[in-house]
Image (cartoon, helix red, strand yellow):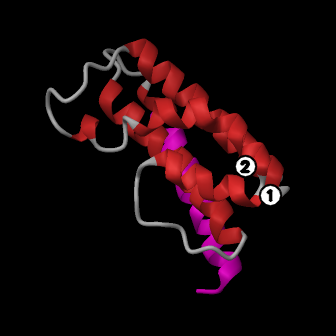
Amino acid sequence: MDRNEELKQWFSHANNDLRLAEHGLALHPAPTEPICCLSQQSAEKFLKGFLFLKGIEPPRIHDLPPILELCEKIEPKFCELSKKCFFLTKFAVAPRYPNELQITDDDAKIAIKFAKEVKVFVEDICHIQN
């Protein structure tokens, strides 16, 4: 696979995760754990896609702050995402296991909102048009 195709894959996977998270909100009761996990995964893939675009091999970690730090070294404006990434990172692993986090509907809505904001930010920085 060439680099352009691989970059498209990063953003396609990120968008798919976000779309699934959004669809989860329509269910009653909403599956808050998967919604938050998918939102975190979407943000992670957008950030890693940016790193890939800039020729940096994305680290194989799920903790968003260190990934964000790498992005900030390239583009300092990424610091604007720090609070969002800090909020989302707790949903990387814990929601996959019972009783790790008590996640509310509000958490799920905020997670989706923040993932969307990461998406818009990265697409703007990368000059990607939808």
> Percent from the top left, x then y, of residue 72?
69, 52
Residue 46 in view here: no
Label 2: how many residues lie within 10 Å, few (<14), some (14-19) or many (20+)?
A: many
Q: Work out which residue is located at the far left of the displayed protein and give it.
A: 98
Residue 118 horizontal side relative to residue 128, left or right:
left
The amino acid type, in three-letter code, at marker 2 is: Val
Residue 10 is one of the magenta-drawn residues: yes
Q: Which disc number belongs to residue 1?
A: none
> Percent from the top left, x then y, of residue 68?
59, 50
The residue positioned 15% from the left and 26% from the top of the image is 99
The answer to whether residue 13 is above or below residue 24 is: below
Q: Which residues are magenta?
A: 1-21
Q: Which disc number belongs to residue 126?
A: 1
Residue named by callout 2: 122
Q: CA distance from mark 1 to mark 2?
A: 6 Å
Determine whether label 1 and label 2 are within 8 Å by CB.
Answer: yes
The residue positioned 67% from the left and 81% from the top of the image is 3
The residue positioned 62% from the left and 62% from the top of the image is 49
> Percent from the top left, x then y, of residue 86?
50, 34
> Percent from the top left, x then y, of residue 90?
37, 35
Helix, strand or loop at label 1? It is helix
Q: Main secondary structure of the magenta part?
A: helix
